[in-house]
Amino acid sequence: MPATMTNVTISIPKRLVVFVEQIVKESKTNTNRSKVISQCLEDMAEKRMIELMEEGYREMTDENMRLAEQSLPIISETWPR
């Protein structure tokens, strides 16, 4: 299902407008300024999500290591030798 679109008015530096228009002109697909800017924002959102996930995994690594260290004596007592 396509995303619902909302019109917004933004102000950006002229050099970025020129850059976006250059991308549109060079594109081999049917694109426009809105699509280019939307794709840039989607890329930023994905990058942010990946960074948050990496941070969460790092935090879980510390927690998992702590739990493993706590469990090791118990496992050593019950594990057959």
Image (cartoon, rainbow, N blue to C red):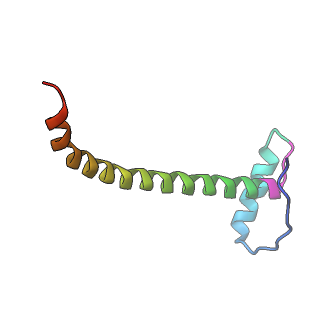
Q: Is residue 36 magenta?
A: no
* Residue 43 drawn above or below residue 78: below
Task: In this rendered view, identify the residue nearer to me: 33 or 16.
Answer: 33
Task: In this rendered view, identify the residue nearer to me: 41 or 30.
Answer: 41
Quarter of the figure that contains the C terminus: top left
Q: How many marks?
A: 0
Q: Position of residue 24 (x, y in %)?
A: 80, 50
Left-right relation of 79 to 58 = left
Q: Residue at x 73, y 69 (%)?
A: 14
In terms of image quadrants, where is residue 15? bottom right
In terms of image quadrants, where is residue 72? top left
Q: Residue at x 77, y 73 (%)?
A: 10
Q: Residue at x 18, y 42 (%)?
A: 74
Q: Residue at x 80, y 53 (%)?
A: 35
Task: In this rendered view, identify the residue nearer to me: 25 or 54.
Answer: 54
Left-right relation of 71 to 53 = left
Task: In this rendered view, identify the residue nearer to me: 12 or 77.
Answer: 77
Left-right relation of 39 to 65 = right
Q: Position of residue 25 (x, y in %)?
A: 82, 48
* Residue 29 drawn above or below residue 14: above
What span is in magenta? 30-35
Q: Position of residue 22 (x, y in %)?
A: 76, 53
